[in-house]
Image: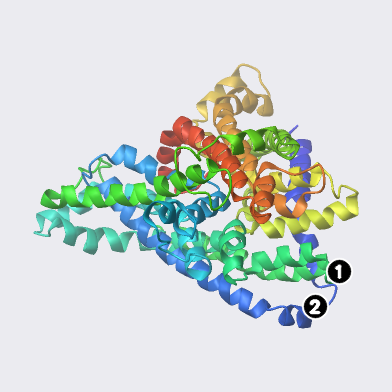
Amino acid sequence: MTLPIRIVLWSSLLGIAVLPLALVVSLAFGANHLPLLLDGGIVQAAVNSLTTSLAAAVGAVVIGTVMAFLLDRTDLAGRGPLKLLLLTPLFVPPFIGAIAWTGLVTRGGLIDRTLGFAPWDFYGFSGVAFLLTLHSYPVAYFVVAAALRRIPADLVEAARMGGATPLRTQLDVTLPLIRPAIAAAFTLTFVSSIGDFGIPIIVGVPGGLDTLSTMVYRYLESGTVDSPLQVVSQIGIILLVLGVLGTVLDRRMSKRVVEFGGSGREFEPMSLGRSRAGVSTAAWAFGLVTTVAPLAGLAVRSLLPAPGVPLTLETMTLGNYQRVLTSAQTINGATNSVVLSIGAGVICGILGLAVGLFTTRLARADREPMLLTVLLPQAVPGLVIATGWLILGRYTGLYNTGWVILGAYVTAFAAIVVQTVRGPLAGMHSSMEEAARIGGAGPFRAHLDTSVRLALPAAGIGAIMVAVTAVRELTLSVLLVSPGTQTLGVVIFQYQRAGDVNASSALSVILMLVGLVVLALFGSRLTRSDSETGKLNV
């Protein structure tokens, strides 16, 4: 019974995860467009992508590591609420974060309107690196926090008994033990940053900063080159290689994780002493400035009737909300996003549960290949996946339909469910399945009645995460939309590109509320489970 299902599962994975990427590779080697790309500035775009991603990875690792120590190892005031506040960027799409920050610090933004000056030009390298850092440090936090939780309290107590101060103990004992996790966090944040599209297109391009991702979009949208899919496939090869290298480095770092023995007792939070008030104030100030302030700027701009209108009680209006909510463009985008995100959630839930079952409870020699196949797209920039589905759409007749967007969503997000269900499935004792077998159930039926049934809640959570992620997505959709298939993310992007920043801000506020609702409903579970696994589920 399991063999036919395994064949169907492998066929699905090859068609969803491997075929689009293989098409990008094959089309890229079909012709030589290197002279065109060199004339188009691919070298400078690659340098810009590498330098901004490098700066973001370094910044994210520093912030995430400090955050992990303060929130998980000290008696910082209000650690629980502060953790949720600091993780807010995780639930705000990067392109909406870019819109929010431009509404705060640039000319005409909230600070300029209230204080009379714009504190930061923002557009260009500094703004892109800053925003990539801001949206990456939660990933670094999860990885480092997971490593901290694996260190037994006995080691720290032994150092303290030997006369080391709390600070010296952290520097001499804890920090060396989490170096592999810090390195893994660096590779993860670097790879995710190098493939980001929303931040560079909104903040980088107006400042003259072109990256590999914006270059892909420019060639596909301009219509100025022959065989644009071949051209962007060759750019995609660079992004694909960088993503795969990042995955290889991450797996090498994960193999260097040291397993410890010990009592397994919980750490007693380290007292900050007289510095507790100052450190707590600084941490809360950082959280409020980096999360609440830009969202306030976004909200204020959404309440103004037009750019340049002074901020007063008389000028504030809900007209932008009424306009975007009643717009046919928004209604169509919302309908498409809801349908596609629910479809992606259901498909990823079923596929992810099956992969989790076959790679844990029904593991055979193909366990690792199957797992790597479904996890590979996580390391691939979204633009490469979108390009692969563009090519696949041309060959299958699905081009300019919502099916290619749905396929890209499943390719990109199936790993979320797999990561969510593998932990519960792997942790179940085999006695339940043995009892079902004794009761007369066949091997596969025994797994269905025990492991699968108990893992359904985890699969449901994973499917919800997929749906919420997909409904706010931009990078995949922006290359795959056609008239009638726009998504909410693309509608916001189109408002922003057309200069209607008030409308884009209003719709961004609405979409952002979805993320905050998810944070309120699932935030504690995510921070707990992800800190234990070191994996990012959103």
Q: Are marks 1 and 2 in contact (CB under 8 Å)?
A: yes
Snapshot quadrant of residue 347: top right
Can you identify the residue that label 2 sits on? 33
Badge number at residue 193: none
Q: Residue at x 66, y 38 (%)?
A: 324
Q: Residue at x 61, y 67 (%)?
A: 205
Q: Residue at x 69, y 34 (%)?
A: 338
Can you identify the residue that label 1 sits on? 227
In this view of the protein, can residue 365 be seen by the observer?
A: no
Quadrant where the C terminus sits is top right
As shown in the figure, which amino acid type bears the numbered disc 1?
Answer: Ser
Task: Say few, some or many: other residues with alpha carbon within 10 Å of mark 2 (under 14 / 14 to 19 / 20 or more).
Answer: some
Does 120 appear above or below 316?
A: below
In this view of the protein, can residue 126 be seen by the observer?
A: yes
In primary-sequence order, the first of circles 1 and 2 is: 2
Please tell me whether mark 2 sits on a helix, a strand or a loop.
loop
Q: Residue at x 55, y 49 (%)?
A: 96
Q: Nearer the viewer, residue 451 or 459?
A: 459
User: How many numbered discs, if any?
Assistant: 2
Task: Say few, some or many: other residues with alpha carbon within 10 Å of mark 1 (under 14 / 14 to 19 / 20 or more).
Answer: few
Most distant residue in the top direction = 439
Snapshot quadrant of residue 486: top right
Please tell me whether mark 1 sits on a helix, a strand or a loop.
loop
As shown in the figure, which amino acid type bears the numbered disc 2?
Answer: His
Q: Nearer the viewer, residue 338 or 159?
A: 338
Name the spot of residue 471 as percent of width and height, x first: 64, 39
Name the spot of residue 400 as percent of width and height, x first: 85, 48
